[in-house]
Image (cartoon, rainbow, N blue to C red):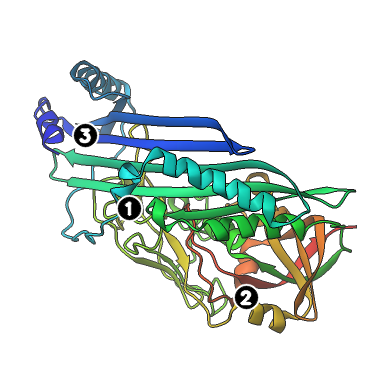
Amino acid sequence: MERARRLLESGRGDEQIEVYLSRGVDTDVEVYEGSVEKLTTAASAGVGIRILVDGAGGARVGTAWAGSLDEGAVADALNQARDNARFATEDEFLAFARPDGVAPAGMSLRDESVITTPLNDKISLAVELERRVRAGDPRIRQVESAAYSDYVIEGALASSVGVEANYARSGAYLSVEAIASDGTSDQTGYGLSAARRPQDLDLDAAATDAIIRSTRMLGATRPSTRRTVVVFDPRTAATVLAIIGGALSGEAVVRGRSFFAGRLGEVVAASAVTVVDDPTDARHFAASNFDGEGLACRRNVLIERGELRAFVYDTVSARRAGTTSTGSAVRAGIAGTPSAGPRALVMSSGSHSQEEILAAVGQGLYVDSLTGVHSGVNPISGDFSVGVTGLMIRDGQLGEPVREVTVASTLQRMLLDVAYVGADTTWLPGVAAGQSLAIADLAISGS
């Protein structure tokens, strides 16, 4: 933080400066047939600088970054940001975030054991994961990849308008992709375990998940076209929630790129649906004390019992909308600039287990993977058409596997047709947690 403060003293005249310093270390291990196939341990450090200059028609912002904290590299980035500001377009809504009095949550999101755990122990986790998958079922023909990865990152942000923030977080992951065969066809299945530190990773959970997901899809066929209830598993439900969360960005709303635009106060979902963006919940892997502009993160209720209550804003999108920041600026590292977006989405848990939801549904489709999400979902119109694989639901139980299925509807209709929200909240890497989610009357297209 002290170095960031010193850089602020480089401001000239009416310049405002924001300095974002970051450094980290990460490890990646991939094994194949019991041997290390790939091993990298990398350290990184850098600075992102923004310079804002007021003009007659609004402010201009110049941005630059350097992938080093060397004095010369930092000085070059500062000069480049200053030059870029000269040629930037003026915008009446551009401004740096200012302190708003909200105190940070004060969570501890970094665990030192990510650094202190011996490299051989990390390799052993990946080797053992592969071994368990290979030995777990005779139908497992191959393990495409088994990997361990972790990271520790810390940073500081300071601006000449009084914002000061620092952060530190860590994470560790096990992942494996298994290939099962019945002699006539192959199917893949992916397993994952995530934690803040290596000691909390669950080998059994990751291995079992990959084995089950691959073997139960053997013999999959295309179902007949129909309309039915679809139950998304926690992973796929998290993907759907992340898509919906993008449409709850104040940036998307003010630019007319959200199907939620102009609908505040309306009922937009079933009464079972409450969506919260809560980076102050340390269970979420995207939790953070500060947002990408250095303001304290906070809990924002976006949809409450089906009613659209709020959007998330950074400073600029809030000024465009005539409101204030919700502490929801996100940015892609030192090279990125802040924009509004949810960080840690979660749908409030229901009261039913997945087994109870399947029993209540009776007949339908259970989805455990999605394809074509980026091309098949339009966040402006809400159109939703994606490929899925999964299993049919027969008499309240998981039945035969199906593939080459398209599920189609609109996000607006899907939210209103949510029938059950599961109690099985699953904390996953990424912007959204997930739980079993049953949605009625979706069109599935097969044979």
Asked if residue 285 shows in the view, the reply is: no
Q: Residue at x 42, y 70 (%)?
A: 309
Image label count: 3
The amino acid on which the numbered mark 2 sits, given as a three-letter code, is Gln
Q: Residue at x 77, y 54 (%)?
A: 138
Judge depth for marks 3 and 1 and give the one in front: 3
In this picture, residue 420 sits left or right of residue 319: right
In this picture, residue 16 sits left or right of residue 304: left
- Sequence-first disc among 2 and 3: 3
- Sequence-first disc among 3 and 1: 3
Quadrant including the N terminus: top left
Front one among 127 and 289: 127
Residue at the disc numbered 1: 318
Residue at the disc numbered 3: 19
Asked if residue 314 shows in the view, the reply is: yes
The residues bearing labels 2 and 3 have C-alpha atoms spaced at a distance of: 47 Å
**55, above or below 264, in the image:** above
Crowd around label 3: few <14 · some 14–19 · many ≥20 (10 Å): many
Crowd around label 1: few <14 · some 14–19 · many ≥20 (10 Å): many
Secondary structure beneath disc 2? helix
Residue 328 in the image, given as x and y percentages of width and height? 34, 53
Front one among 395 and 372: 395
The amino acid on which the numbered mark 3 sits, given as a three-letter code, is Val
Number of the label disc, if any, that sits on residue 354: 2
Judge depth for marks 2 and 3 and give the one in front: 2
The residues bearing labels 3 and 1 have C-alpha atoms spaced at a distance of: 22 Å
Which of the 4 image quarters holds residue 437?
bottom right
Front one among 196 and 239: 196
Secondary structure beneath disc 3? strand
